[in-house]
Image (cartoon, rainbow, N blue to C red):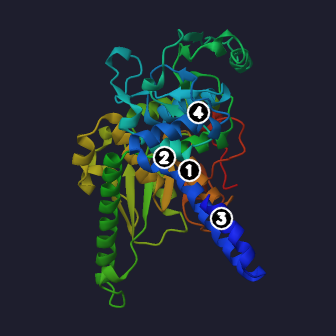
Amino acid sequence: MNILLELKHLKLFSIPARLVICKGLLIVIALILLRAIVSPFLAIDSSEKKEFYESTAPDLLPRIRRDKFLEVPQIIWGLNNQKIAFARACLTARFLNRSLLMPSLSASLFYKEVDLLQPINFDKVFDFNKFNARCHGFVWLAQYSEVSNRTEPFKLQKGTGRRWTAYRDLDQLQQSIGSNADDSEVIEIVGKNPFLWPDHWPVKDYAKIFDCLVLVPEIETEVVNVISKIREAGQRARHEAGSSHSKQRRDSSMNPPVPYVAVHMRIEKDWMIHCKKWEQRSKSHEICSSKEEIIHKVSQITDLHRPVVVYLAVADSLLEDDSITSGWRVGMVAYEKKKLGVTDVYDRQPYLIKSAIDFEVCSRADVFVGNSFSTFSNLVVLSRTERLYNLGKASSCGENIGLSSYAYNVMGGDGGPQRWMTDMSDASLQRLSYGTNNVSCH
């Protein structure tokens, strides 16, 4: 009523005055309406806000249903096989327009003794919330507490054997869309480890999933600790080199940090036996490399500024062999966990966490050198290639663009190791999962 009376009184004012008063009234009305809309949110606590936003999430993610789920078997084997299996499960859930129920990983490394596997929750290794934030709109990871159990899970049996082709597997998934399986709240895939499922997804989709995997803060702290030790070793190497040259600046704190090279050395006895047989079957001589061959190849890398610290990512069985840090060229100072003084960081962790720490140390190195038939090396290079692509660099040929990667088992044009970037146009992860000597700088 008061507003109406004021509007009648406007007739008493001139036209400019009326305009000013009308604008003022409109602002007041807008503020009243805004408060009416916002005040319910201000009155609720943080838990209620969370429930509100989660309840509207299906509209924000029209392709990924939050009320339908996919459940997969426990993910097993090595760290990078587990990462591939997890990504494959995520992409399968995406294909079925479902959220993936957070799977169980394996903390221990057993290939046949399944009863000895030590399950570990995904969120004990990778940050659950950061994964969903980074992969928002692409895939969605759900907790088991979100399942209402309104219906019995639909069990989807994965086929086995040579007759179970990729075509038949994809057809099975397509048949699950719009069928009785789609009515079930949960589709439970029964059978083999997701790493062994036929692959239907391009490399760039896997790269997207891997980029969403962020270590939990406790493990990230250990990674930073190890990298700091490597950098400190680099500073000492620079100082020692400077002390023998009068023209060299002696205060290492005034110089930028010495970059480090990470080398994934596969020279364990069981690996050498395996890869020699692999070479015989494939009639290739670019799979195995001895310690001497690796040292020679790494010394040929032209974009290394010596002195440089070489961090050797090696199996625990090699830590007792002091010779792996000897024989390196002048200006190349080799360290492994034991010599670096970080064995305590690794010793208190299960296998999976040890591998996760080493993976990040290698992934963040200034230069990485690995074996193109190693899944570990392949995924490190994929991570580095993804970062280069994000920087707008699709090739590392002929120049030092940073984040350089090399394959020491493949001869490059200059006699050193082959420059290496992942082919992001690959239609599947086949070459990364099982290895190839067809690598290039693209």
* Residue under pointer 4: 434
Q: Is residue 224 left or right of residue 95?
A: left
Query: Quarter holding the C terminus?
Result: bottom right
For the image, the number of numbered tags is: 4
Which residue is more in the foreground, 423 or 90?
Answer: 90
* Residue under pointer 1: 37
- Do the numbered discs 4 and 3 sit on residues whose CB atoms are within 8 Å? no
Q: Earlier in the sequence, mark 3 or mark 2?
A: 3
* Residue under pointer 3: 5
Q: Amino acid at mark 4?
A: Tyr
Quarter holding residue 315 = top left
Q: CA distance from mark 3 to mark 2?
A: 31 Å
Question: Residue 66 placed where, x, y %?
Answer: 57, 29
Q: Amino acid at mark 1?
A: Ile
Q: CA distance from mark 4 to mark 3?
A: 82 Å
Question: Residue 115 placed where, x, y %?
Answer: 34, 14
Of badges 4 and 1, the one in the foreground is 1
Above or below 86: residue 225: below
Look at the numbered disc 2 and give the secondary structure of its residue. Answer: helix
* Residue under pointer 2: 40
Q: Earlier in the sequence, mark 2 or mark 4?
A: 2
Look at the numbered disc 1 and give the secondary structure of its residue. Answer: helix
